[in-house]
Amino acid sequence: MRFYRPLLVLATLLAFGVISLGAYVRLSDAGLGCPDWPGCYGHLLGVPDAAHEQSAALRAFPGKPVEAHKAWKEMVHRYFAGGLGVLILLIAGLAWRHRKTLQQSPWLPTLLVGVVGVQALLGMWTVTLLLKPVIVSAHLLGGMTTLALLVWLLLRQREQIQHSPTGELRAFAALALFAVVIQIALGGWVSSNYAALACGDFPTCFGAWLPEMDFTQAFQMHHELGQTADGASLSSTALTAIHWSHRVGALIVTLIVGRLAFVMSHLPEWRNWALLLGATLLVQIGLGIANVLLSLPMPIAVAHNAGAAILLTVTLALNFRLWQTTSRIQQHLQKAH
């Protein structure tokens, strides 16, 4: 089916764009640029720009002054996300209709439709629940899940998975993927709680390796933005704990993914993958450090979010490829011991 793969490529690129746009909207404090959903002050197309439109919006939404520049950012993100949803529905429909030609189960594209449905709900709740951190974080993870499933579907179009015995390298690559996913979740929690600048120095935090922190408040899932579960203001020590945990996660990812890249660099057929993985990791580390030292400049902050998506994609693609592991990798690991 000649249109299936191009649609997957387009949807994958669009998913990456939606993730980057979402980061831009969140970091520019435009997540509540529209007080309603799916429209914006009642407008499904555009935002209230004209004076009479803004007056009508204020009457319809008292206490919600119109900030057109923020509203446009939010709506552009919604339009892109909506376009992605339509593409994914089309992909799922083609997967079912041409399942014999494709020779692949259509259930993964169907699962993707379900993920998009949940994403739409999370997008709505992000607005209606006023940027509740657990919802914002889940929305980010949903976007990354959408991208990951699209990447997996795209990779399946190139070669079939061969189910051979799992080797040590595959297990280590799976561990690397797990570490990257957990780190993305921690990064989402940092962003949704606005804790990116809780530590203004690097590599220490407030000049200490172990600053004063409150982990009890930091990881209470059910709380409003800037508040504890009891309604009190979220303390600076809780924000520090969130930020510090993300730094520790980054160190763990560096050790695991860096080790994986090092091992693979000694295998000629995997050397290019090792270089790609190592370079992506180093760039992502550099962007994270720059965010702290330069006080979260918008281009670098958005690039850091995009870098997380790229690192996830590379690690996932590598895991897919390692299902094709040859006996040569097994022999190399035996020699290493």
Image (cartoon, rainbow, N blue to C red):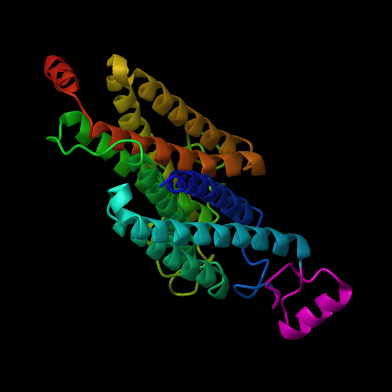
Farthest right residue in view: 51
Q: Residue 257 location, x and y as percent?
A: 34, 31
Above or below, comparing residue 108 to residue 68 in the picture = above
Q: Residue at x 65, y 62 (%)?
A: 74
Q: Residue at x 56, y 52 (%)?
A: 18
Quadrant housing the C terminus: top left
- Magenta region, mostly helix, strand or loop? loop
State the residue in front, 168 or 269: 269
> Magenta segment: does it hold 55?
yes
State the residue in front, 288 or 98: 98
State the residue in front, 162 or 22: 162
> Magenta segment: does it hold 168?
no
Where residue 128 sits, quadrant-wise, is: bottom right
Q: Is residue 17 visible?
A: yes
Above or below, comparing residue 158 to residue 86 in the picture = above
Q: Which residues are magenta?
A: 41-66
Where residue 96 sits, quadrant-wise, is: bottom left
Q: Residue at x 61, y 38 (%)?
A: 300
Q: Residue 111 location, x and y as percent?
A: 34, 61
Q: Is residue 297 visible?
A: no
Q: Residue at x 19, y 21 (%)?
A: 329
In the image, 127: left or right of 146? right
In the image, 24: left or right of 47? left
